[in-house]
Image (cartoon, rainbow, N blue to C red):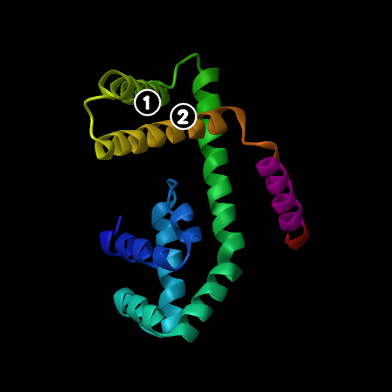
Amino acid sequence: MSIPILQAALSLAQFTPRVAKWLSGTKVESISQKIVEIAKNVANTKDEFKAIEKIKSDKNMYDLFQRALINSEREIELAIIKDKENARRRDIAIINAGKRNKRADVMVVSAAVGLIFCLVSIYLYRKELPGEVVGIISTIAGIFGSCLKDAYNFEFGSSRGSKEKDQTVASMLNRFN
């Protein structure tokens, strides 16, 4: 993977939270390249970092970048959906082969142990720990909790509202295809 492209894509995430969400899957390289290409086209430059500076300093260019991202959102969201489908199919194939997905098991157990460790640490040392340390440990516990939530969403599907959104997106995609 090209580190400068990823750095540029992460820098572009400052302009919209949507970009940061898109960069959280296994398709991060292709999505990063897509986002950086959008920025370079909007800024009319071949250098990604010059494009970032132009978008940062020019409100009109910033607005054009936002519009270009919205126009490309369908393609990017579709790539993310396909990525999740492929991961679920892989897990199903592993289970059908009579094996266990040890990597996923280790990830879930690690997140659970990390969460429990944080909560027990706060409980046992609550009187001795300064408030700042409790805040940091609480933040880490929240990250572990979020990891568990993501694992449950992957394993059992997402919430009803998200399912409705997925159905809406699917019906929109069917109209375009």
x, y percentage for residue 136? 29, 38
x, y percentage for residue 31? 45, 59
Q: Which residue is mark 2?
A: 148
The image quarter in which residue 10 lies: bottom left
Q: On the picture, is 106 further left or further right than 159? A: left
Residue nearest the observer in this picture, 136 or 31: 136
- Of badges 2 and 1, the one in the foreground is 1
Residue pictured at 53% horizontal, 50% vertical:
80
Whether residue 27 is situated above or below residue 41 in the rendered picture: above
Residue nearest the observer in this picture, 132 or 4: 132
Mark 2 and mark 1 in contact? Answer it, CB < 8 Å: yes
Q: Dot 2: few (<14), some (14–19), or many (≥20) neighbours within 10 Å?
A: some
x, y percentage for residue 32? 40, 61
Q: Residue furthest top?
A: 98
Q: Which residue is mark 1?
A: 115
| Badge 1 element | helix
Q: On the picture, is 139 further left or further right than 176? A: left
Image: magenta residue range = 161-174
Residue type marked 2: Leu
Mark seen at residue 107: none
